């Protein structure tokens, strides 16, 4: 179990629920889509808005921080010009082969998500190097198989069977959380929680041929982790200043509003522009490409924002990740 010095949120329970082991997300999503199939599109849109695009939008908080502007100027070519060149190239390739861009997007997402999973292992001092290799191997094995043959291991469970599995896994899940919080689980068993989370993220793609459902079930845990870490870090950094500065407090409200509006716009573009099957052919919309471009930038720029070997990042982000006791 993480030491008291290694809490991202206010307490160990929230760290476990939102970062170490957010398995409640796939359990909840699976329960909703199988029990309310007529609302599946609304459930998917809600997950896009509340978690997926909100997590993408939260990246922009880094650029709203004036302390980071000088660093941005120094790295302007890598963070602005180079991505713009890639943006133009992506649009050109999309015109000829949208499928190729979607595959690249999935692979880039896989790299980004898996890097975060291994980063969380390091955050909580889950030291065995083999754990990182396990996460990488299983994630990219599942992703490679799933992109070629999604739902390869799909079963024909009915709603009753699915609900039984959800109930059993829910009981096991919350029992693990309770045992961990109470200190009954030893360190080695506690370390399995972030390991399991990292391993599970791309497993659903083997059991569901619907890539939207498979992505939400697994990557939804990544969205939850990212939102929790970045907002905890951002608020912790700005909380002291906000108490003494009403303008800054209003500024934070505006930034939250920006994140929500951004998420709503991008969710709408992704939802209404999703590829459609027409007469056995897939039709692609340019609307769908717009959120993909911003998501690709998110995957790219996060490699710099969370690069703690950079002296500026060490000062700007690292001191605020964990709650001080």
Image: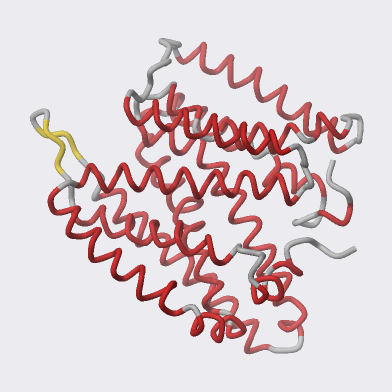
- Residue 301: x %, y % from top left: 48, 64
- Residue 114: x %, y % from top left: 55, 43
Q: How many marks?
A: 0
- Judge left or right: residue 156 versus residue 99: right
Q: How is the image coloured?
A: secondary structure
**Residue 214 in the image: above or below residue 89:** above
Residue at image coords 20%, 47%: 98
Residue at image coords 61%, 63%: 307
**Quarter residue 39 falls in:** top left
Q: Please state, as top left, top right, bottom left or bottom right, where the C terminus lies in the image.
A: bottom right
Residue at image coords 47%, 51%: 52
**Quarter residue 318 falls in:** bottom right
Q: Nearer the viewer, residue 37 or 247?
A: 247
**Residue 57 in the image: above or below residue 127:** below
Q: Nearer the viewer, residue 325 or 40?
A: 325
- Residue 139: x %, y % from top left: 52, 33
**Residue 251 in the image: above or below residue 154:** below
- Judge left or right: residue 31 versus residue 311: left
Q: Please state, as top left, top right, bottom left or bottom right, where the N terminus lies in the image.
A: top right
- Residue 221: x %, y % from top left: 57, 42
Q: Residue furthest left?
A: 279
Residue at image coords 43%, 32%: 143
């Amino acid at each position: 179990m993480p030491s008291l010095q290694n809490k991202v949120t206010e307490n160990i329970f929230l760290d476990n629920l939102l970062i170490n082991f957010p398995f409640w997300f796939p359990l909840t999503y699976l329960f909703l889509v199988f029990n309310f199939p007529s609302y599946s599109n609304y459930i998917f849109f809600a997950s896009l808005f509340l978690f997926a695009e909100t997590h993408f939008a939260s990246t922009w908080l880094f650029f709203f921080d004036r302390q980071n502007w000088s660093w941005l100027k120094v790295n302007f070519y890598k963070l602005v010009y180079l991505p713009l060149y890639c943006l133009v190239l992506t649009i050109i390739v999309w015109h000829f082969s949208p499928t190729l861009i979607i595959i690249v997007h999935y692979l880039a997402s896989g790299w980004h998500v898996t890097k975060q999973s291994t980063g969380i292992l390091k955050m909580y001092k889950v030291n065995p190097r083999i754990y990182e290799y396990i996460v990488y191997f299983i994630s990219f094995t599942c992703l490679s198989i799933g992109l070629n043959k999604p739902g390869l291991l799909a079963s024909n469970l009915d709603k009753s069977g699915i609900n039984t599995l959800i109930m059993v896994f829910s009981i096991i899940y919350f029992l693990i959380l309770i045992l961990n919080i109470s200190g009954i689980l030893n360190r080695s068993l506690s370390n399995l929680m972030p390991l399991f989370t990292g391993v599970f993220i791309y497993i659903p793609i083997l059991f569901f041929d619907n890539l939207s459902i498979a992505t939400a079930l697994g990557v939804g845990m990544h969205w939850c982790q990212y939102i929790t870490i970045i907002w905890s870090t951002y608020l912790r950094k700005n909380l002291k200043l906000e108490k003494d500065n009403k303008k800054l407090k209003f500024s934070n409200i505006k930034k939250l509003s920006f994140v929500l509006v951004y998420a709503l716009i991008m969710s709408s573009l992704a939802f209404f522009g999703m590829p459609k099957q027409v007469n056995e052919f897939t039709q692609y919309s340019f609307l769908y490409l717009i959120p993909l471009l911003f998501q690709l930038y998110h995957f790219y720029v996060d490699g710099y924002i969370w690069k703690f070997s950079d002296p500026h990042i060490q000062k700007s982000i690292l001191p605020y990740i964990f709650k001080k006791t």
